Amino acid sequence: MGRLGLAGLALAALSAGAIGVGKAGESTPTPITISFNTPAAGARTPTPRPVIRLTQTPRPATTPTAAPTATAEATPLDLEFEADDWDGGFYQGSGEAYAREWTAVYGAQSEYPAGILTFELDDEPTSEVLFRVEGLDDEFPGKHQIALEINDRRVYEGDSPFASFGGDFQNPEWTRVLIRIPEGLLEKGENEIAFLSLEPSAATGVPPYFLLSVASLRGDDADDEATETPAIVPQGDDEEIEIEPSGEDDDGEGGDGEEDDG
């Protein structure tokens, strides 16, 4: 059976509630090396597939909050997000597929075109902030084309940084991605970090899609090592997306190749 056929059967079984896989703690994602390029012209052409009817898991009415502020000095920025904190996508909280809870983002014309985190900050960060997110790309060849926006400012556009799903629902290769957010992009009060699909598809339940799971947001003065989760993600280097502190990247001065010889 072809790779897409296997994934189609697995996704169909998921919608029927018939997939039995390992518990959330049993997946072992492995960081991979990915080169980010300008999105290739044209969209991937998926093989026609039946649309699966989805039943979304209700989201608990919770909002991630910062740690309590100390009396003498401010507590370092340290926020944690769960899979159900992503708005705009399809949330599945049973843990019966992909070995954990997740929120799926489908095509740009679908009912679930984005994954958006909304949170409050007591003060504007005055230094770099580290944002980590764990995700999984679909089983189609090539990478899902995505955009990353911070407070409605597009800071990245291109390939999904997440590993592709290989068909093993018990041990999918979740990827943890590190995004260094420069000073000036986050602000006091309400903020948003959004992953958007750029794939021209309205389908749900089948590729194209990508999955988002847990995430964290920490200042560079937070105790990062104390909050790592080696049972879910092995220690080591994260995959990393580089973003520019300014959205003005079309002025002809510099660019992606400014360090190249010649």
Image (cartoon, rainbow, N blue to C red):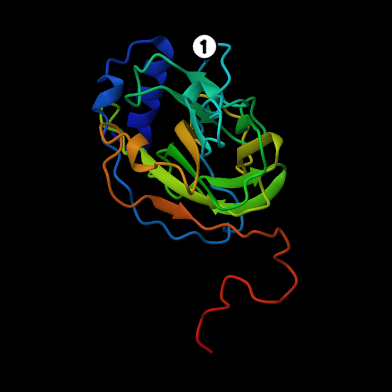
**Quadrant position of the C terminus in the picture:** bottom right
Horizontal arrangement in the rendering, residue 140 relative to residue 193 (left or right):
left
Residue 7, horizontal then vertical, whole percent: 36, 30
- Residue 238 x %, y %: 37, 50
What residue did someone put label 1 on? 55
The residue shown at (40%, 41%) is 223
Furthest-front residue in this view: 72
Which one is nearer the viewer's eye here, 153 or 226? Answer: 226
* Residue 213 x/y as whole percent: 44, 30
- At 56% from the left and 47% from the top, the residue drawn is 145
Q: Is residue 142 left or right of residue 188?
A: left
* Residue 51 visible, this angle: no
Left or right, 227 with reference to 50: left
Vertical arrangement, residue 260 with respect to residue 15, above or below: below
Give neighbour class at mark 1: few <14, some 14-19, many 20+ (Cα, 10 Å): few
Residue 227, quarter of the rendered image: top left
Furthest residue in direction bottom, as rendered? 262
Q: Is residue 120 above or below residue 259?
A: above
Report the number of numbered marks.
1
> x%, y% of residue 183?
63, 53
Picture residue at 61% right of the left edge, 25% below the top? 87
| 163 horizontally vs 160: left or right | left
